[in-house]
Image (cartoon, rainbow, N blue to C red):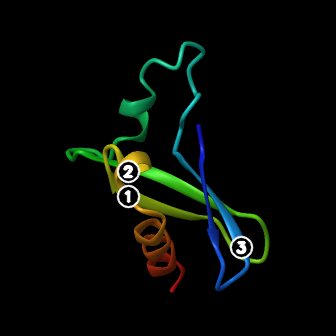
Amino acid sequence: MPREIEDSEEGVRWSCAQAYAGLTESGAGDDDAARVEGTERFRVVCTPSGGSRSVELELAGGWDESLSDEELLREIRSRQS
């Protein structure tokens, strides 16, 4: 399930989801498909509500629950530059 956050400075709502989620019918193997090879990090794609381009991040497992909105926005902004 995507995680949505609001960037009030830019007026953009971001929807972030682990890359490749839902590729298999049963959902099995999604974590392996999104895992950055040789690490415990996962590819996460964040898509804006408008104006900006999508960004791909590499985040530690559990990012959807462990990162605060501010930390996730910081990661997004760092990839936009």
Q: Is 70 displayed left or right of 14 in the figure?
A: left
The quadrant of the rendering that contains the N terminus is top right
For the residue marked with disc 3, what is the amino acid?
Val
Q: Which residue does the image show at 34% across and 51% down from the upper left?
A: 66
In the image, residue 42 above or below residue 74: above
Which amino acid type corresponds to the residue marked 2 in the rendered image?
Answer: Trp
Q: Residue at x 44, y 80 (%)?
A: 78
Q: CA distance from mark 1 to mark 2?
A: 5 Å
Q: Which residue is mark 1?
A: 67
Which callout, 3 or 2, points at the residue further toward the start of the chain? Answer: 3
User: What percent of the width, then of the height, locates residue 60?
Assistant: 29, 51
Determine which residue is flagged by label 2: 63
Q: Work out which residue is located at the far right of the displayed protein and give it.
A: 50
Label 1 SS: loop
Q: Quadrant of residue 34?
A: top left
- Residue 51 is tagged as none
Mark 1–mark 2 CB contact (< 8 Å): yes
The local crowd at label 3, few if under 14, some if 14 to 19, many if 20 or more residues have their Cα within 10 Å, is some
Numbered circle sitting on residue 12: 3
